[in-house]
Image (spheres, grey):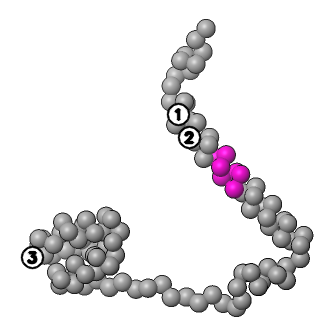
Amino acid sequence: MHDVVADLAPAKEPYREILNAAAEDGRVREFQRLANRAGVPFTVTKAMWRWPGRTIVDQLEETPADALQWLARWAYEGCCRLLNIAAHKEWEAGFDHHPASRWLRL
């Protein structure tokens, strides 16, 4: 959408602001409607892909219990690691931007 707005012809300049607003807000259908009104080529293509085979639930029913426990543990540790990284970044943003002298006053 941003490319369409950037490549807008000078004759279509009156539409630039409303097209840009729709693009900034992520309103794809509104952008398509406005682009059609302005005579600017833009189409929305729906994502169409069928999941091959069975559902994940059906697949996991036949998976051995120890493999499911390993997968659950791996997912849990990954989430904990991501949470710790996020908490560390927030700590740095909140406190580490001050000089060390601020924290070492006696």
Q: Is 40 placed left or right of 97 in the picture? A: left
Mark 1 is on which residue type?
A: Gly
- Return the residue at label 2: 90
- Return the residue at label 1: 94
Picture quarter with the C terminus: top right
Secondary-structure class at tag 2 = helix
Magenta span contains residue 42: no
Q: Are marks 3 and 1 in contact (CB under 8 Å)?
A: no
CA gap, disc 3 to disc 1? 49 Å
Mark 2 is on which residue type?
A: Glu
Picture quarter with the N terminus: bottom left
CA gap, disc 3 to disc 2? 48 Å
Residue at 81% in and 60% down: 73
Q: How far across and how far down the image is residue 74, in percent?
A: 78, 61
- Return the residue at label 3: 11
How crowded is the residue under tag 3: few (<14 C-alpha within 10 Å), some, or many (20+)?
Answer: few
Q: Main secondary structure of the magenta part?
A: helix
Picture mark count: 3
Q: Is 70 placed left or right of 31 in the picture? A: right
Q: Are marks 1 and 2 in contact (CB under 8 Å)?
A: yes
User: What range is drawn magenta here?
Assistant: 79-85
Q: Quadrant of residue 72?
A: bottom right
Sequence-wise, the earlier of marks 3 and 2 is 3
Q: Quadrant of residue 27?
A: bottom left
Residue at 79% in and 79% down: 60
Secondary-structure class at tag 1 = helix
Q: How far across and how far down the image is residue 31, in percent?
A: 28, 76
